[in-house]
Image: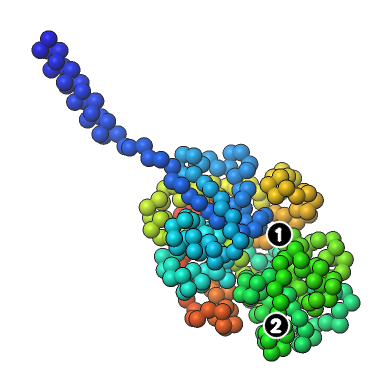
Amino acid sequence: MQRWSKAGALAVAVFFAMAVALPARSEPVKIRIGWIGAPGQLVAFMFAKEGLAQHLGKSYTFEPLHFAASPLQITALASGDLEIATLGFSSIALAVQNAGIEDIRIIADEIQDGAEGYFSTHYVVLKDSPVQKITDLKGKVVATNGIGAGVDILMRSVLQQHGLVDRRDFTTIEVQFPNMRAVLAERKADLVTATLPFAFDPEMEKISRTLFFGREAFGPADLSFWTARAGFIEKNRSAMSDLLEDYVRAIRWYMDPKNHDEAVAIIAKTMKLNPAIFARWVFTRDDWYRNLDGLPNLDALQKNVNAQQELGFIKSNFDVNKYADLSLVRAAAARLK
């Protein structure tokens, strides 16, 4: 009996020693990602195709959260109610300079306007409009989706290059993208902003002609990219790496021409819209540019930020490289090659 007790005690001791030596199984990291518009931003449907999110539920969980505008995402990121905010060149400065999020980091790209050979925002007038060149907009009314928004800054930059300044030479009104065609048709504005998918609306194409493109402002513009706070990244590097690997895998799948019809069907189902709305352009060269490695164009982004300062939308310039950490997405892309 005494010998059994010693043996039993030894077995128990060995068991606990092994248990202590084993790594603790941690719960998947919860990652909430904000998004504003689809299908430009993949977040709402990027893992709808089975097999793309190979690490989902293992190292991380994923929750897409819809926001009406970038400033709301910045507030949520600052308060800890969002792990990843999808911002653009027009809003990263707001996060840094206005919200004081000095540890914000750009970690991956989404879409770029005006990249060589890809879609760039159209600024259109009526086909019978007397406006034949940009300088003809003097004394006219132009429509933007929001003062200081990305495509608004592109428009103002082009007009400024031609000597036209807001409130001195033209009047700006704010119009939601779906209403741009009606505003133009009713001659409430002389020039309106036509972005995706509205630029390819047959009714818009029937009544309008393009006066200039967004790329004429300063070349490519980074309209949307992923951002997170440095502390969260460092604490959860493994989970973030896995998420970005799955994200890059999703980008490549959606951009593969052989998957086009299935991708269109996924978007149409997600957005509850007719597939014909997207089939002509989405994930083609008529769409915004998406880098297959998820890498932003930081050189272009710096020009974008500089233009904001020149137009008076931000207080001062800043080095965007200071607010970028592309190590995880580079590693993720490398693992998929």
- The structure residue drawn at horizontal position 48% and vertical position 73%, both measured from the top left corner, is 98
Could you tell whether 49 is left or right of 96 in the image? right
Q: Mark 1 sits on what residue?
A: 287
How far apart marks 2 and 1 lie (CA) works out to 24 Å
Residue 17 visible in image? yes
Which amino acid does the dot numbered 1 rest on? Asp
Residue 216 lies, in percent from the top left, at 69, 76
Residue 311 lies, in percent from the top left, at 59, 82
Residue 22 lies, in percent from the top left, at 30, 34
Residue 11 lies, in percent from the top left, at 20, 21
Q: Secondary structure at mark 2?
A: helix
Q: Secondary structure at mark 1?
A: loop
Marking on residue 38 = none
- The structure residue drawn at horizontal position 55% and vertical position 42%, both measured from the top left corner, is 53
Which residue lies most toward the top here? 1
263 in relation to 11, above or below: below
Could you tell whether 269 is left or right of 250 in the image? right
Which amino acid does the dot numbered 2 rest on? Leu
Residue 259 visible in image? no
| Label 1 crowd bin: few (<14), some (14–19), many (20+), radius 10 Å | many
Question: In the image, which is nearer the foreground, mark 2 or mark 1?
Answer: 2
Given residues 109 and 252, the one toward you in this image is: 109
**Displayed quadrant of residue 203:** bottom right
The tag earlier along the polypeptide, 2 or 1, is 2
- The structure residue drawn at horizontal position 55% and vertical position 60%, both measured from the top left corner, is 86
302 in relation to 237, above or below: below
Q: Are marks 2 and 1 in contact (CB under 8 Å)?
A: no
Q: Mark 2 sits on what residue?
A: 159
Which residue lies most toward the right here? 128
Could you tell whether 220 is left or right of 133 in the image? left
